[in-house]
Image (cartoon, rainbow, N blue to C red):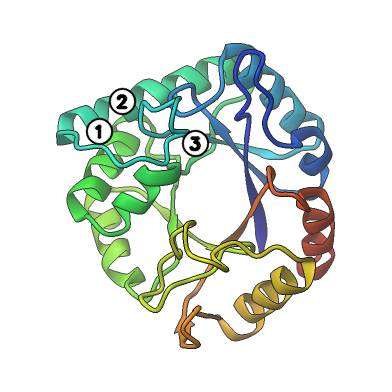
Amino acid sequence: MKLNCDMGESFGSWSKGMDADVMPYIDMANIACGYHASDPQTMDYTVQLAQQSDVMVGAHPGYPDLLGFGRRDMVLSADELRLMTVYQLAALDGICRVNGTSIQYVKPHGALYNRMMVDEATLGALMQAVAGYSRDCPLVVMATPEADAVRRLADRHGIEVWFEAFSDRAYDDSGRLANRSIPGAVHKTTEAIEAQVLQIIEEGAVTSLGGHRIPICADTICIHGDSEHAVAAARHIRAVVGA
């Protein structure tokens, strides 16, 4: 089970996350591409951090929403979605190339990620963007009970999908992430995080805030590098899932 983490989300003089401390414990770094966060210097620094720890580099594109950190939904046409995604992939891939590497997968961010999991048109536009840019890059999507439908759509676009579950976010009864405004939507302790990770690995399921068991099958688990206990949680989860 691979661990992934959203990274490179600082911008100018504004600092976010504990990337250098978390990086040694993960397998996949989802690096912001300048739309919801990051800038060229931050991208370059984070790519080099990933290389030093032999961590895969993934593009983390989002809505063009620096002020809202990409967590506000936007109404865009399919062409706008496709091209803004290609733009961001190319930006990070250019930074990667001058460092002797390239992007290895794509994971959308925030509101864009949530939208693609409930709107097939958005998901299709993102798959089209990835397929057009590099068919070798899998698209990371949320592990839900509807995984087979997502696989079929990916097959039509000729790309691979990797399914992810979340270590530190609670689920609602539909199997999606609970809104951050809901009490308990973010797990605050390593004990709660470990319990959810173990359930994902051992049972192929999560328990929703409403107490329902939701079956999911995940290829990777996400941790958030900007949480209060990010480093301790990353270290702990690494021990739980193994090397």
- Type of residue at label 2? Met
Q: Is residue 174 left or right of residue 166?
A: left
Q: Residues within 10 Å of mark 3 (few under 14, many from 20)?
A: many
Mark number displayed over residue 84:
2
Q: Are marks 3 and 1 in contact (CB under 8 Å)?
A: no
Residue under the image location 71 percent in, 78 percent down: 195
Up-down: is 171 above or below 50?
below
Could you tell me residue 184's position as x and y percent?
57, 68
Could you tell me residue 146's position as x and y percent?
32, 72
Mark number displayed over residue 81:
1
Residue under the image location 14 percent in, 34 percent down: 77
Quarter of the image where one finds residue 12: top right
Q: Secondary structure at mark 1?
A: helix
Marks 3 and 1, the one that precedes in the sequence: 3
Q: Residues within 10 Å of mark 2 (few under 14, many from 20)?
A: many
Q: Secondary structure at mark 3?
A: strand
The Cα atoms of the two marked residues, 3 and 1, are separated by 14 Å
Q: Identify the residue under disc 3.
A: 60
Up-down: is 122 above or below 186?
above
Tell me if residue 243 can be seen: no
The Cα atoms of the two marked residues, 3 and 2, are separated by 12 Å
Depth check: give the residue in front, 196 or 155: 196
